Image (tube, rainbow, N blue to C red):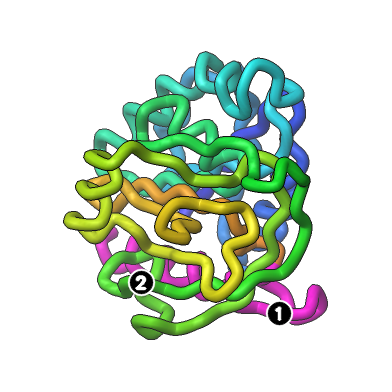
Amino acid sequence: MKFGVVVFPGSNCDRDVAYVTKDLLKQPTRMVWHQETDISDLDIIIIPGGFSYGDYLRCGAIARFSPVMQQVVTHSQKGKPVLGICNGFQVLTEAGLLPGALVKNRDLHFICDRVPVKVERTDLPWTQGYQEGEIITLPIAHGEGQFYADAATLSELEDNNQVLFRYEGDNLNGSVNNIAGICNSTGNVLGMMPHPERASDPMLGGSDGLKLFQGLLEKVAALV
């Protein structure tokens, strides 16, 4: 499978993601500059973490207008997988590919830590490598990671089982309903604040995040 990692001015986790897809999973991986307008050669798009355009205005608000994002929208509408991690999650909400918004952390502090995360469902490619209810450990590093949605949107997310990950125990950023990651209604677009790519190599102290990439790879390969 061919992965594409979108690179905005200010992205700083793009190489981390590429290390997982290219070096650990041994899959062809292309770095996609934000001004590109043709990503038809790619199977899976990943929008990595960082500070796209310096996080000016709102996190992800400027990146949403980059030329590549219309291609990402089209990619998702074809049912192809799109993953947004941290700043990438923020970009996906700004682009309307996922509901809700990411706002400043509850205590207005930047948080860098490892946190327990509960896997809510395992019937999607993203999570098929886990057990339902499994508690995994993933790093977080964000200043605006508090997930917020109005009551109607939140109810829809919960009713449709679109919450894939929740913070277990302490909810450090104050996200409503402890939400750490959600998907769209069809399940092919995932946004999450924790960093699975930073927990994919035992050298970094844990590999709980690798199963997310492996499960996705197995599912897409089976479909092809």
Q: Position of residue 192 (x, y in %)?
A: 51, 52
Within 10 Å of disc 2 (Cα), the crowding (few <14, some 14-19, many 20+) is many
Label 2 sits on a secondary structure element that is: loop
Q: Quadrant of the C terminus?
A: bottom left
Predominant secondary structure in magenta? helix
* Residue 168 higher or lower than 175, as above or below: below
* Residue 21 position in % (x across, y down): 61, 59
Any magenta on residue 217? yes
Q: Position of residue 180 (x, y in %)?
A: 49, 57
Q: Which residues are magenta?
A: 199-224
Taking depth in this image into account, of 126 and 38 the one nearest to the observer is 126
Q: Is residue 18 found left or right of 120 in the rendered image?
A: right
Q: Which quarter of the picture shows residue 164?
A: bottom left
Which corner quadrant of the image does residue 30 belong to? Answer: top right
> Residue 40, percent across and down?
40, 32
- Say which quarter of the image contains residue 121: bottom left
Q: Earlier in the sequence, mark 2 or mark 1?
A: 2
Q: Give yes or no for contact between labels 2 and 1 (Cβ–Cβ under 8 Å).
A: no
Q: Relative to the observer, which residue lies in front, 138 or 67?
A: 138
On the image, numbered disc 1 is attached to which residue? 206
Instruction: Name the residue: 35% across, 71% down.
Output: 120
The dot on residue 128 is none
Amino acid type at circle 2 is: Glu
Say which residue appears at 42% left-offset and 80% top-offset. Answer: 130
How many marks the image carries: the answer is: 2
Residue drawn at x 78%, y 57% as measured from the top left: 112
- Is 31 magenta? The answer is no
Query: What residue sits right under mark 2 in the picture?
Result: 120
Instruction: Identify which amino acid the numbered label 1 is placed on.
Output: Gly
